[in-house]
Amino acid sequence: MSKLIKKRCIRCGTVFNPHGGQLYCKKRCRDLDYKETREATQKIYKVSRGHYVYTDPWIKIVRLGYHHPDKNVIWEATDAHGVCVAHGFTKKEIIMRIDKLKEEDKLYS
């Protein structure tokens, strides 16, 4: 007898039956997350392959390469002086870290 698995939506907290790796209960919750992600990524401009510029504080995001043990691509963010600000496995993760540092006033300009 199969057991029904119920999950809570990470956006609104309602309980739902997930299909696959679903994290949200309704299409509205997924669309809200997409909209927020889209607003964050509109501050990024592509310079060349693997090189991006984040314009809110001027920060360069560079693809360092593939890390085989983790099977992920590693990204690094450096400020205008060449000081490393953040490392991460996705550009979205780096942007979230930069925004967090900016809110805490730990980001040098």
Image (spheres, rainbow, N blue to C red):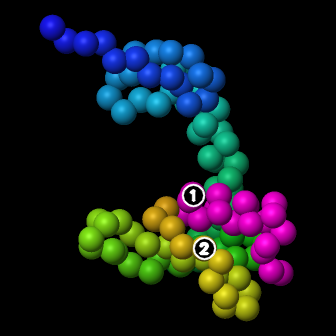
- Quarter residue 11 falls in: top right
Q: What amino acid is at disc 1?
A: Lys
Residue at image position (43%, 72%) is: 74
What range of the chain is rendered magenta?
A: 91-109
Look at the image and say whether residue 107 sits in the magenta stretch.
Answer: yes
User: What residue is at 81 percent from the left and 64 percent from the top?
Assistant: 104
Classify 107 as above or below 101. below
Give the main secondary structure of the magenta stretch. helix
The amino acid at mark 2 is Ala
Residue at numbered disc 1: 92
The residue closer to the viewer here, 45 or 30, is 30
Q: Residues within 10 Å of mark 1 (few under 14, many from 20)?
A: few
Query: Can you say which quadrant of the picture contains the C terminus?
Result: bottom right
From the image, tell me which residue sits under label 2. 86
Q: Nearer the viewer, mark 2 or mark 1?
A: 2
Mark 2 and mark 1 in contact? Answer it, CB < 8 Å. Answer: no
Figure quadrant of the N terminus: top left
- Assess whether residue 96 is covered by the magenta stretch: yes
In the rendered image, residue 94, in percent from the top left (x then y), is placed at: 59, 65
In the image, is 109 to the left or to the right of 18? right
Q: Mark yes or no: residue 109 visible.
A: yes
Viewer-proximal residue among 53 and 72: 72
Q: CA distance from mark 2 to mark 1?
A: 12 Å
Picture coordinates of residue 70, whole percent (x, y)? 31, 66
